[in-house]
């Protein structure tokens, strides 16, 4: 391992998840272990989950949300339930970091949780603080979460400048 590295992929452009997963896949090809935890992602697409099962044990995918509908379309009680599920995912991420269960942890769309008030920037900062000396952490999402930038090694912002 090349040491501790933390990177954010953010912005309104496409490719944030692809960039993080691409880095993870490249490292998995060298024998490193990768855990991906997805938040607020489309849950009706089983193709992604099936593909990840073929990549195990080098790359493992976890999703903690249970409702098939988008978070925004849930009623108040369902949102509260889903928030608990998301917090379980956050606690799992913390456990993975503390126990150094993998070489690379990808928290896909976690930055968007801050915009919805589900997770605070301080909670994300605590995750960053838990990254071990030989681990890599990638955080993705549309939110820029600039308050985290001083604590990470690299920020890649993807923007859509022109759409035809």
Image (cartoon, rainbow, N blue to C red):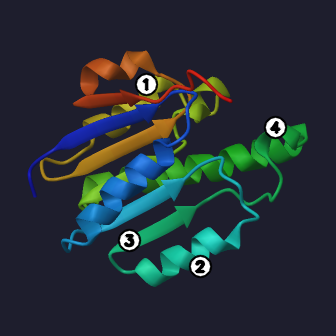
Q: Residues within 10 Å of mark 3 (few under 14, many from 20)?
A: many
Judge left or right: residue 157 versus residue 63: left
Residue 126 lies in quadrant = top left
For the N terminus, the image quarter is bottom left
Image: 53 above or below 103: below
What's the CA distance linking mark 2 and mark 3? 12 Å
* Precedes in sequence: disc 4 or disc 3: 3
Q: Nearer the viewer, mark 4 or mark 2?
A: 2
Judge left or right: residue 41 versus residue 129: right
Q: Residue at x 44, y 59 (%)?
A: 36
Which residue in the protein does label 1 denote?
A: 122
* Precedes in sequence: disc 4 or disc 2: 2
* Precedes in sequence: disc 2 or disc 3: 2
Q: Residue at x 87, y 41 (%)?
A: 73
* Precedes in sequence: disc 1 or disc 4: 4
Q: Residue at x 80, y 59 (%)?
A: 68
What's the CA distance linking mark 4 and mark 2? 26 Å
What's the CA distance linking mark 4 and mark 3? 29 Å
Secondary element at image label 3? strand
Q: Are marks 2 and 1 in contact (CB under 8 Å)?
A: no
Secondary element at image label 4? helix
Q: Residues within 10 Å of mark 4 (few under 14, many from 20)?
A: few
Which residue in the protein does label 3 denote?
A: 59
Of 37 and 8, the residue lying toward us:
8
Of 41 and 130, the residue lying toward us:
41
Expressed as whole percent of the image width and height from the top left, the position of residue 8 reads 37, 34
Image: 4 above or below 30: above
């Amino acid at each position: 391992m090349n040491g501790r590295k933390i990177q954010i992929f953010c912005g309104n452009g496409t490719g944030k998840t692809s960039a993080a997963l691409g880095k993870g896949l490249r490292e998995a090809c060298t024998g490193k272990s990768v855990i991906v935890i997805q938040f607020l992602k489309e849950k009706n697409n089983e193709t992604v989950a099936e593909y990840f099962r073929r990549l195990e044990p080098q790359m493992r995918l976890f999703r903690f949300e249970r409702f098939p509908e988008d978070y925004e379309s849930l009623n108040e009680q369902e949102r509260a339930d889903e928030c608990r599920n998301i917090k379980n995912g956050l606690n799992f991420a913390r456990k993975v970091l503390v126990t150094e269960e993998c070489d690379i942890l990808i928290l896909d769309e976690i930055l968007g949780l801050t915009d919805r008030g589900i997770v605070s920037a301080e909670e994300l900062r605590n995750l960053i603080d838990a990254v071990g000396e030989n681990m890599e952490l990638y955080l993705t999402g549309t939110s820029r979460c600039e308050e985290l930038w001083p604590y990470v090694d690299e920020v890649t912002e993807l923007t859509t400048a022109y759409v035809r």
